[in-house]
Amino acid sequence: MNERATLKAAENGHLMIGGCDATELARQFGTPLYVFDEAYIRSMMRTYKNTIDNFYGGNGKVLYASKAFSCEAVYRIAQQEKIGCDAVSGGELYTALKAGFNPENIYVHGNNKLFCELEEAVEADVGGIVLDSISEAQALDGICRDRKKVQNVLIRINPGIEAHTHAFVQTARTDSKFGFSISDGSALEIIKGVLALKNISLKGFHCHIGSQIFEKQSFVLAAEKMMNFIKHVKDETGFVADTLNMGGGFGIYYTDDDPKLREEDYAAYLMALIGSIKSKSEELNLPEPYLLIEPGRSIVGESGITLYTVGTIKDIPGIKKYVAVDGGMFEAPRYALYQSKYCAARADDVNAPCTQIVSIAGKCCESGDLVAADVKLPEVRKGDILAVFSTGAYHYSMASNYNRNFVPAAVLVSDGKADIIVKRQNYEDIVRNDVIPERLK
């Protein structure tokens, strides 16, 4: 069990999260069930905000990365903790606004924003839009001209840092669909093009080097390259960036292959990044830029667990043992996508000794439908409740109705109280948008 998240065992061995008994949560709300610890989420938001306040004089802002987990309740928490958010789709923007989020604290991202999404962002008066193509910049300029507005923008830059992580979540390699490369000159060209547009105001640059990163040096190198780039742009164009968005990517604990970081460790990552920016600003005679960061996974990832009910158990002698649960790739897609690793436990006895290595199988009609592979577990029986840890990020947000399965409910727990924040779907939700043409009736 992850020692850092607010999880513990009760005297009877039951898993407790946010003061709630996980087996009771499963009984009350059904399974599969996403469970989020509110105190943990707030603590991580405060860790990042306090670090910027204390070590960078408050000259920056934390933007919660919505893609990790987006629903009205998490936006309400972010608003209360006085941080901003980023949105990468019209749906995320709409959800944040519906939750009452201050649009000035919203930044809109995406490598292929729809025209209507750009319109929605401008009409909402968001704080910034991160540009990812010259055609997008031109379209945005036209939208703003028609509405007699000027929109603040950043340009996404690819610094060429290859973080030591899964290839699918490295986003700053030279070969990437994101941003403009420093190395081939394309970044400088779009900057010149954007500066020539009258209805958008370039404030600075954005970069994001990837996800699930544990090396401080990756963030330090990225900051150094971006500061050098800011100086190069100044020398070439006269433009001095006053905002630098360094993205997110801070890693979390999934299994013992990962370090178990504490709040102070995340603060140390950010302090190293801030230190690099400060020293380069002095070295290059540049003003210290307003700093934006975009943590998402590290805020909600370890706050979440998923509860399942064990169904079929199939032991193939000498090969593998499958423990099937009532979920699968429709609500836990990361193994199918990245072969992601997880820890799990029996919720009725988290201290039970692990005596077997199993694959936790889903119920979808796919051979690759696994929730997790090679997981250490105690003996389990049909009907047992399993808890899979560190599922707060990219589970609900990537969930689907594959095989017409339901997207599970999500509950927020705090001080022994559990509240629904996302309702469980039902059969009527599954068919709600189906239409039978007249000729088939």
Image (tube, rainbow, N blue to C red):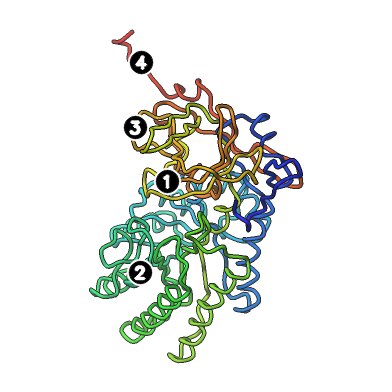
Separation of marks 3 and 4 at Cα, in angstroms = 28 Å
Q: Earlier in the sequence, mark 1 or mark 4?
A: 1
Q: Earlier in the sequence, mark 2 or mark 1?
A: 2
The numbered disc on residue 334 is 1
Q: Earlier in the sequence, mark 2 or mark 3?
A: 2
Q: Residues within 10 Å of mark 2 (few under 14, many from 20)?
A: many
Q: Are marks 4 and 2 in contact (CB under 8 Å)?
A: no
**Image point (44%, 21%), residue name:** 431
Q: Are marks 2 and 1 in contact (CB under 8 Å)?
A: no
Q: Position of residue 371 (x, y in %)?
A: 45, 40
- In this view, the mark in front (2 or 3): 3
Q: Which quadrant holds the C terminus?
A: top left
For the residue pair 175 and 149, the one nearer the viewer reads as 175
Locate residue 49 relative to residue 12 in the image: left or right: left
> In terms of secondary structure, where does tag 4 sit?
loop
- Number of marks in picture: 4
> In terms of secondary structure, where does tag 3 sit?
loop
* 290 versus 411 height, above or below: below
* Residue assigned mark 4: 436
* 164 versus 188 height, above or below: above
**Image point (33%, 34%), residue name:** 367
Mark 4 is on which residue type? Ile
Q: Position of residue 263 (x, y in %)?
A: 63, 66
Q: Residues within 10 Å of mark 4 (few under 14, many from 20)?
A: few
* Residue assigned mark 2: 157
Separation of marks 2 and 3 at Cα, in angstroms = 38 Å
* Residue assigned mark 3: 366
Separation of marks 2 and 1 at Cα, in angstroms = 27 Å
Separation of marks 1 and 4 at Cα, in angstroms = 34 Å
Mark 3 is on which residue type? Glu
